Image (cartoon, rainbow, N blue to C red):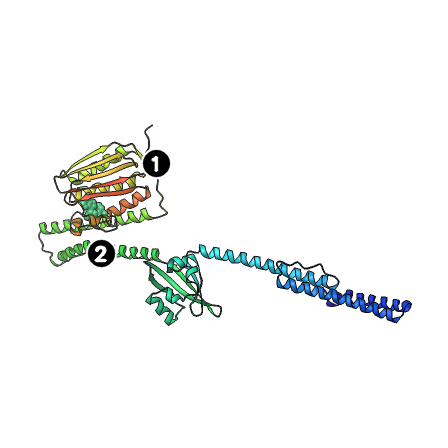
Amino acid sequence: MRPRLLFWIPAALRLLIVLAGSAVIGLFAGPVVALSVALLALVVAVLVQLNYLYLLAGWLDNPAQVRLPDGWGAWTDIFSRLYRLRRDDERNRTELSEWLARFRQAMSLLPDGVVIMDDVLFLEWCNPAAERHLGLKDERDKGMRVTNLIRNPAFMDYIILGRYDQPLTLSLRERKLIVQIIPFENRRQILVTHDATETERIEMMRRDFIANASHELRTPLTVINGFLEIAASQPELDRATRGAHLQLMAEQGQRMQNLVEDMLTLTRLESLDYPLRVEQVDMALLLDRILREARALSAGRHTVTLVNEAPDMRGNADELHSAFGNLASNAVRYTPAGGSIVLAWRLGNGGPQFSVQDTGIGIRAEHLSRLTERFYRVDKSRSRETQGTGLGLAIVKHVLLRHDASLGIDSQPEQGSTFTVTFPMVATVLPA
Ligand SMILES: Nc1ncnc2c1ncn2[C@@H]1O[C@H](COP(=O)(O)OP(=O)(O)OP(=O)(O)O)[C@@H](O)[C@H]1O
Ligand SMILES: [Mg+2]
């Protein structure tokens, strides 16, 4: 900044020049003329100052439209300083509005909701995630009280108790939300919302899975422990009874082993670190294996036939064996003796299809959507008789997911069922 003295020196010099000029005129033309000249010079100077003041007042009224003159004398400096101030102000304003736009864009991309309210909970602003979570509309609801917009008893209690250091879990609009109020500045508060629906669902699935798995393991364990107690308390039991008990214990042991193996398979299929190993699958070989296994399981009680009309496909042979084998074993286990089962590999319009058709007990429509859930069985006692764990179709579902395939189920109670797996057309390996 220039020293103020420097700023006044040119003005003082001009005044001195006028006074000196008037003195010189006084020497030649007498004091009256000299005074008149000095007076005239002063009047001109005052008029010039008034004009600049007038221009300055006009500019201050409307700085964006009116231009400041270059000015004269000290005014040049004043005007250029004012110009600079205005330019800086404009730049600051542009920077500020750019920063605000960036901030709003960042906020609108946040997956979590942010609501800014004043100290008495009147809505000032909210981002799109908060609009989705809480059913608000920034434009419409601005200036309204948040407690009138979010009508939820738990939320009301949270506000009344004012324990904002703890988050609140809220069930709102069929979602699980974690909300928390954070006071900031003196007279403002932020309401943050986080959608925990998916986490909650996974947590529930995990709890269900553990509960179901423990339950499934407990039954065979109870049976084995029961027989062990009998064996310990009645050592004199005859060989035949003891043999029968051992046989039942072995069956239950096998059942536990199947269960643990299925659970491990499921965990492996779900794991992200276990990518699909794609190879060309010799379908004739795979289908023949499935047919032989189904016939072995049926032990001559059913007619099991195979139709193979489609070319080979790309996928993982072991996983496909496990999925197709599950479908075929279900058909055998849920079809009474004398029934027939057709395994087919055909090329449909959407892509290659593997289907298993049986003339078995069928499934009522209300069960169909739940069949692929872990441990879901239509008739628990019957499935237990057939050594079922209820994990078979869950494994099928995961294998199909990994192969981009879909499962269709068509079933009529007492008539039979058809399970159809459709692979994408790209999975087909065209014969050379
Ligand atoms: N072909 C079918 N006919 C009738 N019901 C079936 C058939 N396939 C499956 N189901 C029903 O769907 C349920 C779930 O099948 P899933 O294969 O998942 O389990 P499971 O066969 O009981 O046991 P696992 O396959 O693990 O040994 C079965 O318990 C059964 O009630
Ligand atoms: Mg099964």
Q: What amino acid does circle 1 point to?
A: Val
Q: What amino acid does circle 2 point to?
A: His
Which residue does the numbered mark 2 point to in the structure image? 215
Give me the C-alpha separation between circle 1 and circle 2. 42 Å
Whether residue 254 is visible, yes or no, is: no
Q: Is residue 1 above or below residue 290?
A: below
**Residue 46 x, y percent position in the rendering:** 75, 67
Residue 308 figure quarter = top left
Q: Residue at x 33, y 31 (%)?
A: 430
Residue 319 figure quarter = top left
Q: Nearer the viewer, residue 416 or 46?
A: 46
**Residue 247 x, y percent position in the rendering:** 14, 49
Residue 208 falls left or right of residue 160: left
Which quadrant is the C terminus positioned in? Answer: top left
Q: Nearer the viewer, residue 114 or 199?
A: 114
Q: Is residue 84 above or below residue 405?
A: below
Label 1 or label 2, whichever comes before in sequence order: 2
Residue 426 badge: 1
